[in-house]
Each structure stands twice: as C-alpha cells, then as structure tokens.
Amino acid sequence: MAAAAGTGQGEDAGTLDAQARTYWREQALAWLRADLVWWGKFLETAMPEERARLLGALRTWQTTFTLAAVREPGGLSKLPAAERERWQRLWTAVAALQKLASPPK
C-alpha cells in the first residue's frame, strides 16, 4: 500500500528516501480521497442494507495498521504541518460520511 511505503513500512520501504516517501503518502491521500468521493456518491442511492458495505470500508480505513501512521496522532505529528492538515481533513470527512451512512439511533 502506498501509505505504508510513504511511512517507512513494508519490505522495500527502507530503500525509499524522504522525497519518495512523501510521493507515496501524497499518492495514498489522493487515492483515498477519490475513494471517499466514490463512496459519497454510492451513499446517495444506497439501500439501507448496502450502507453496511460502505461502513465496513470506512471502518477498515479507521483501523488498519498500514494507515495508522497517517491517521493516529503519533504518526501525524511526524508529518509536515501542511501534509498533516490534509490528512486530518480526510479523516474528518471519513467520520462525516460514516455518520451520514449510519442508521438513525
């Protein structure tokens, strides 16, 4: 996964310099944003039972180890401020979409 390479995880991540790691983090962010847009459009027409698929995908993003370094405070604190802010905006948008997709309580 691009985020893993960008945060020094994985077999070959140790061979990447700072510029390459930044590239892969930015690529991961772009792909996740694109997926989030797709999920948002999916939600517009999703039947209640289909929302579980969306919620499962977002839960995976929020719990997978490979995204922890760009999601959790400890990992985010190691990123440049502008990049950290972009990741934080993504996670805020993920939480908002998750809330929209969740069944009413």
Image (tube, rainbow, N blue to C red):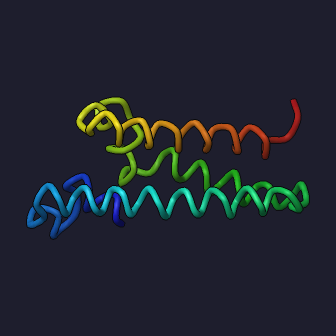
Residue at coordinates 35% horizontally, 42% vertically from top-left? Answer: 83
x%, y% of residue 67?
39, 50
The quarter of the displayed image where residue 47 is located: bottom right
Q: Residue 21 lies in what quarter of the image?
A: bottom left
Q: Is residue 79 left or right of residue 57?
A: left
Q: Residue at x 13, y 64 (%)?
A: 16
Instruction: Residue 20: name its quadrant.
Output: bottom left
* Quadrant of the rendering where the N terminus is positioned: bottom left
Using the image as rendered, state which of residue 19 and residue 76 is in the foreground: 19
Residue 104, placed above or below residue 44: above
**Does residue 40 appear left or right of residue 89 in this picture?**
right
Measured as percent of width and height from the top left, residue 8 is found at: 19, 55
Residue at point 17%, 59% (across, down): 19
Q: Is 96 situated above or below 65? A: above
Residue 29 place in picture, x, y as percent: 44, 56
Q: Quadrant of the C terminus?
A: top right
Residue at the farthest front position: 82
Measuring from the top left, give residue 22's x and y in whole percent: 25, 55
20 left or right of 85 in image: left
Numbered circles on residues, count: 0
| Frontmost residue, 61 versus 81 | 81
Depth check: give the residue in front, 11 or 38.
38
